[in-house]
Image: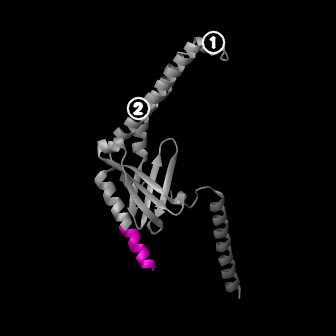
Amino acid sequence: MSDRADEHRDVTNVAARAGHESERDRRIPGRGRVPLRDPANPVSRKAIVLWLLEAVFWAVILIGGSYFLARWIDGDRWSWLPGWATDNIWWLPVLVAVLLVPGTFIEPFWRYAVHRWEFSEDVVYARSGWISREWVFVPVSRIQTVDKEQGWFERMLGLATVEIRTASHAGSSTIKGLDYAVAAGLAEGLARRAEELRDDAT
């Protein structure tokens, strides 16, 4: 009788400890969870040139726009602006350039380090972003359309973007900076696998 009572107490104590540990794991953020690993494949190194060209393009637009805005303000002497602002308005394009130029050359390398993708086990896994990062998991069975696109700079560099769309906008994904042949193969493979999964379901 005492052996059974002792055994019962031991089992109860083990269960209680396990319950306390699981409660503690739920209270501690990240405890017992597997961290997100990097997707297997980086994008093409030519994507660095692509993002550099795009960043330079927008930097030129913004710096040029600030120059013409300063010229307009200086010529018309806007009365509603304080005197110190109109007297120093030519610092505006200089300030814009100082703020934009460092980021213009840092951003492409940063993006290249972040952007990765993977297609395995009927799931597309992609990571993108720059200052903020986004992880997207797209089940192939939910894919409705797969497109590959090329902008001007992408055509120049032989790159392409794969657009993966599902019924939910939140479940869609874009993989940018792929070599054209890789993008074409990925788009074809995804479309074929999605069709196979739909046939299996019916």
Residue 147 in magenta stretch: no
Residue 194 in magenta stretch: yes
> Which secondary structure is most common in the magenta stretch?
helix
- Amino acid type, label 2: Val
Q: Which is more toward the observer, 161 or 108?
A: 161
User: In the drawing, what numbered circle is on residue 84?
Assistant: 1
Q: Is residue 37 visible?
A: no
Q: Please, is residue 12 above or below residue 132 in the view?
A: below
Residue drawn at point x = 37 percent, y = 55 percent: 148
Residue 101 screen position, x and y as percent = 44, 27
Residue drawn at point x = 43 percent, y = 40 percent: 110
Q: Which residues are magenta?
A: 192-202
Residue 91 screen position, x and y as percent = 53, 16
Residue 29 screen position, x and y as percent = 61, 55
Q: Which is more toward the observer, 102 or 147?
A: 147
- Amino acid type, label 1: Trp
The local secondary structure at tag 2 comes to: helix
